[in-house]
Amino acid sequence: MHLTNRELAILGACLYSCEGTKARLVKGRKQKHFAVEFTNKDPQLIKAFLLFLRNSIKAEEDRIKAQLFIYSDLSESDLISYWSHLCNIPICRFNKSIVLIQRNHKYKPNPLGTMKIRYTHKQHYLEIQGIIDELFKQF
């Protein structure tokens, strides 16, 4: 099944409205930070959001960054390699991983960690917000 451009835009807007970071003030300033950040542990959702960024938004590839959130018992290098290959993001565009402290040892964390896609581009951020606004006007 292939998504139309409109379907991909709707999918991406819905994913971002649920799991994306909203505009926020920069610490100590009155200006907003317009980074598109999408965080999830599901590889299929990460791939779908990247497809939206790359095909619908026409993201500048060199601005797409990645970051992992992992627990200390996971192999950071193996997971970076896995996500890099899966998402077609070079390892050099991965920010430093965040290593979390596991407080409940009965909880089994996701063996793939959690991935954050970060894309800083004000116009594209506003374009995504415009798609979301148009989509939700219908309700």
Image (cartoon, helix red, strand yellow):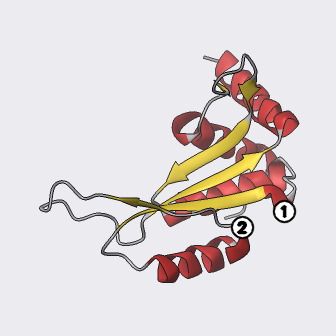
- Disc 1 packing (10 Å; few <14; some 14–19; many ≥20): few
119 over 42 or under it: above or below: above
Q: Quadrant of residue 128?
A: top right
* Left or right: residue 68 compared with residue 102: right
Does residue 32 appear in this view? yes
| Quadrant into which the C terminus falls | top right
Q: Quadrant of residue 107?
A: bottom left
| Residue at screen point 63% across, 75% down | 84
Q: Position of residue 60 (x, y in %)?
A: 87, 56
| Residue at screen point 63% across, 58% down | 48
* Left or right: residue 73 compared with residue 113: left
Q: Position of residue 42 (x, y in %)?
A: 47, 61
Q: Position of residue 49 (x, y in %)?
A: 65, 53
In this figure, which residue is indicated by the disc labeled 2? 93
90 over 108 or under it: above or below: below
| Residue at screen point 55% across, 80% down | 82
Contact, CB < 8 Å: mark 2 with mark 1?
yes
| Quadrant into which the N terminus falls | bottom right
- Disc 2 packing (10 Å; few <14; some 14–19; many ≥20): some
Q: Quadrant of residue 103?
A: bottom left
Q: Residue furthest left?
A: 106
- Of residues 115 and 136, the one nearer the viewer is 115
Asked which secondary structure carries label 2, the reply is helix
Q: How far is mark 2 from mark 1, CA to CA?
A: 8 Å
Disc sitting over residue 21 in the figure = none
In this figure, which residue is indicated by the disc labeled 1? 62
Specify which label sits upstream in the sequence, 2 or 1. Answer: 1
Amino acid at the residue labelled 1? Asp
